[in-house]
Amino acid sequence: MRERVTEVLKEILDPDLGVNIVDLGLIERVDAEAGRITVDLIMTSPACPQADYLADQSTQLLQQTFGAATQVSVAVVDYPPWGPERMSDAARRQLGWAP
């Protein structure tokens, strides 16, 4: 189920970069079991103005995908700090960085 949650979260794009939050390395933790999904997100900077937006979008999409019977909790956490090494090769290519 964890893999399915991660695949669903790939549909959420960072509005500033146009790259999905999974490939950007913003997913810190996913706990998923029948009836409950918990996700921790980290932002590229502590004062990221998109934090609430990305958490809300993630919550809504997961709730829509897994149904009202599933308890969904998405939180933005401050630790560990994000670094560009968290990005996938696909995100690096999309942003014009050499992998």
Image (cartoon, rainbow, N blue to C red):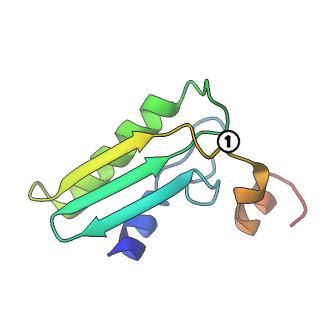
Give the residue drawn at x 49%, y 46%. Answer: 41
Q: Which residue is mark 1?
A: 17
The answer to which image quadrant residue 69 occupies is bottom left
Query: Most extreme residue toward the right, as rendered?
Result: 98
| Mark 1 crowd level (few <14, some 14–19, many ≥20, 10 Å Cα) | few
Q: Where is residue 5 shown, x and y percent of the image?
A: 37, 66
Q: Where 3 falls versus 85 (above or below)?
A: below
The answer to which image quadrant residue 14 occupies is top right
In screen coordinates, is 14 left or right of 82? left
Dividing the image into 4 quarters, which one contains the N terminus?
A: bottom left
Give the residue drawn at x 42%, y 75%. Answer: 3
In screen coordinates, is 90 left or right of 63? right
Q: How many marks?
A: 1
Q: Amino acid at mark 1?
A: Leu
Give the residue drawn at x 77%, y 51%. Answer: 84
Give the residue drawn at x 56%, y 59%. Answer: 22
Q: Which of 36 and 88 lies nearest the eye of the viewer?
A: 36
Q: Where is residue 79 shown, x and y percent of the image?
A: 58, 42
Q: Where 63 falls versus 49 (above or below)?
A: below
Query: Most extreme residue toward the left, as rendered?
Result: 69
Query: Most extreme residue toward the front, as rendered?
Result: 79
Mark 1 secondary-structure assignment: loop
Dividing the image into 4 quarters, which one contains the C terminus?
A: bottom right
Q: Where is residue 67 shown, x and y percent of the image?
A: 15, 59
Q: Where is residue 34 shown, x and y percent of the image?
A: 18, 71
Q: Where 57 falls versus 37 (above or below)?
A: above
Q: Which of 71 and 95 lies nearest the eye of the viewer?
A: 71
